[in-house]
Image (spheres, rainbow, N blue to C red):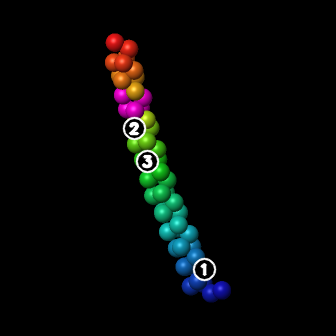
Amino acid sequence: MTNGSGGAKSTGRTDLERENDELRRRVDSAQQRTKQLLDRLRFLRQQHELGADR
């Protein structure tokens, strides 16, 4: 291997690390949105059950 390909590998690794960070952020954001939706669903179910008890 030459120094040029070694440099490309380190740049590639840096690109992968950046991509990994972005994917982690996207997964975290999706998890937060999913939790919010589940919380809303629980609330709506509770409201529906309370309404059905009347």
* Magenta span of residues: 39-44
Within 10 Å of disc 2 (Cα), the crowding (few <14, some 14-19, many 20+) is few
Q: CA distance from mark 2 to mark 1?
A: 46 Å
Q: Residue furthest right?
A: 1
Classify residue 1 by image quadrant. bottom right
Decide which of tag 3 and tag 2 comes sooner along the chain.
3
Q: CA distance from mark 3 to mark 1?
A: 36 Å
Question: x%, y% of residue 15?
Answer: 50, 69
Q: Which residue is mark 2?
A: 37
Residue at the spot 40% in from the left edge and 27% down from the top edge = 45
**Circle 2 sits in a helix, a strand or a loop, which is it?**
helix
The type of residue carrying mark 2 is: Leu
| Up/down of 10 relative to 39, above or below | below
Q: Which residue is mark 3?
A: 30
Q: Which residue is mark 1?
A: 6
Report the front residue among 46 and 11.
Answer: 46
Within 10 Å of disc 3 (Cα), the crowding (few <14, some 14-19, many 20+) is few
Residue at the spot 33% in from the left edge and 18% down from the top edge = 51
- Is 15 placed left or right of 43 in the picture? right
Q: Which one is closest to the eye, mark 2 or mark 1?
A: 2
